[in-house]
Amino acid sequence: MSDNEQEKLYRRIRDNLLDSIDEELENEIEDVLDDRQVNRDGAPKLDRKLYFRELIRLQRELIELQEWVVETKAKIAVLFEGRDAAGKGGAIKRITQRLNPRVCRVVALPAPTEREQTQWYFQRYVPHLPAGGEIVLFDRSWYNRAGVERVMGFCTDDQYEEFFRTVPEFERMLVRSGIHLIKYWFSISDEEQRFRFQCRINDPLKQWKLSPMDLESRRRWEEYTVAKEYMFERTSIPEAPWWVVEGDEKKRARLNCMHHLLEQIPYKKVEREQVELPPRIRNDDYERQPIPEDSIVPKVY
């Protein structure tokens, strides 16, 4: 390869990396639009350069974790719970952004069907638990019963109490089976949730995030607080304690969660052989066929 060709290759690689960074900037657009320079408690917001530098570093570490999971057939299940608009989805998005979706997948189950309502409560979650070599992130989990179902009256008192009798042993079984089980609660202040809900109301790109259930949860703030405190008391066990992520500042919450998650798993760097691109096989009798003009997507941009 000539020096000129080498230079062109480096330039294309650099452009590709910049495209990747642009993807991250697209994800951050809501933070760019929220131009507050300080947090509501008066503390300065996290410097954007520092945020992106740490985000990329942690995402590289997550890739090393992923390679270790595949190599050792480890099983990781991470539960994300918290109030609406607390930042669970944003954290999940940054964790999964650079990972292989065949290794790391997100589970966000809808409301149970009529049939599922007659099953053992945990039954519909069990098929989604990780097999060897998998990481599963639950965007809400079986703790729906301890939160929304309790507050909104979707379960009976007996079902509620049975949940608390069962869940500690259920989770101990998961841990004994070899699953690394990590539980996060994203905490957000009353004022910050009100602000984020108002942003969703005013943003046509995010109005879909605001459901009637979200509005009702806002009205019942104190009931959710009582339910959360009781849930912590009954279900924070040594084998699977609750970890609280302070979510009023999204960027710090994401980095703190990612950093903490990496600390919970005893992974090691998997050494890989240097990858070399093999030469392409070329056949003299091969001729590429032209693509029909009417099959090409119009170049509007």
Image (cartoon, rainbow, N blue to C red):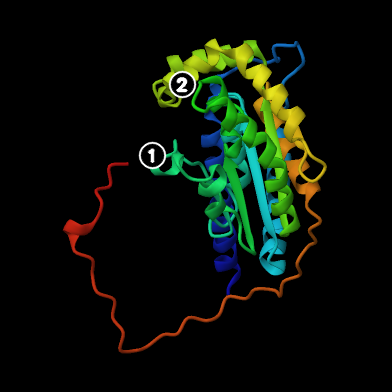
Residue farthest to the front, as pictured: 158
Q: Nearer the viewer, residue 1 or 154?
A: 154
* Of marks 1 and 2, the one in the foreground: 1
- Relative image position of residue 209 (x, y in whole percent): 45, 26
Which residue corresponds to mark 1?
114
- Relative image position of residue 68 (x, y in whole percent): 72, 63
Lower sequence index among marks 1 and 2: 1
Residue at x-position 66% and y-position 17%? 225
- Label 2 residue SS: helix
Q: Which quadrant of the figure has residue 233?
A: top right
- Label 1 residue SS: helix
Amino acid type indicated by mark 2:
Met
- Mark 1 burial class by Cα count in 10 Å: few <14, some 14-19, many 20+: few
Which residue corresponds to mark 2?
213
Q: Is residue 63 visible?
A: no
Q: Nearer the viewer, residue 161 or 239?
A: 161
